[in-house]
Image: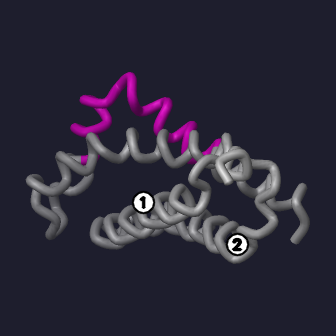
């Protein structure tokens, strides 16, 4: 992979994560209620779903912003991958197989970014070194 390809991948997944968080923040309470309702029939208790539903948009926004500006890129990649793994777990618990491919695709992006982290030359991380 080259530096420009890496930048395109980083910006693409960064925009996806940032956008997910950004649109959910203004309607956080409604998003939380929707998520709780989605998990009603699952084995995941509401006491876990509620705090996760409030934290998710903030975490998505932060991971996305860090990836967009290339700051703490390695940590942002790990955060994004962890978010996706938690979402995949939740998705399987509610058997929403239609959205699973999108989440898996996000994980592929994060894995590629981590695998080629040395190509991350267009980043604020370099200014910190």
Residue 64 locus on image (x, y percent): 56, 45
Residue 16 shows in the view? yes
Q: Which mark is residue 112?
A: 2
CA distance for labels 2 and 1: 16 Å
> Residue 104: x and y, percent?
56, 70
Neighbor class of circle 2 (other Cα within 10 Å; few <14, some 14-19, many 20+) is some
Q: Is residue 9 above or below residue 22?
A: below
Q: Main secondary structure of the magenta part?
A: helix
For label 1, the crowd category at 10 Å Cα-Cα, with few meaning under 14, some 14 to 19 and many 20 or more, is: many
Q: Is residue 121 left or right of residue 4?
A: left
Residue at position x 48%, y 39% from top? 61
Task: Tell whether label 1 touches label 2 (CB within 8 Å).
Answer: no
- Viewer-closest of 20 and 68: 68
Mark 1: which secondary structure?
Answer: helix
SS class, disc 2: helix
Q: Position of residue 86 (x, y in %)?
A: 36, 65
> Which of these two is toward me, 5 or 104?
5
Judge whether 120 appears above or below 69 on screen: below
Residue located beneath label 1 in the image: 83
The quadrant the C terminus occupies is bottom right
Per the rendered image, the range of residues in magenta is: 15-35
Residue at 87%, 71% in the rendered image: 1
Residue 98 visible to an observer of this rendering? no
* Horizontal side, residue 38 vs residue 106: left or right: left
Q: Residue extending furthest top?
A: 26
């Amino acid at each position: 992979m080259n530096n420009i390809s890496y930048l395109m991948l980083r910006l693409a997944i960064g925009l996806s994560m940032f956008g997910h968080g950004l649109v959910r923040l203004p309607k956080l309470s409604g998003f939380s209620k929707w998520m709780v309702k989605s998990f009603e029939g699952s084995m995941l208790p509401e006491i876990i779903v509620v705090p996760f539903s409030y934290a998710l948009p903030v975490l998505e926004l932060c991971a996305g912003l860090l990836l967009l500006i290339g700051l703490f890129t390695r940590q942002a990649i790990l955060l994004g991958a962890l978010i996706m793994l938690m979402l995949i777990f939740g998705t399987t618990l509610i058997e929403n197989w239609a959205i699973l491919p999108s989440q898996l695709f996000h994980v592929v992006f994060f894995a590629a970014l981590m695998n080629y982290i040395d190509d991350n030359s267009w980043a604020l991380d370099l200014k910190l070194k």
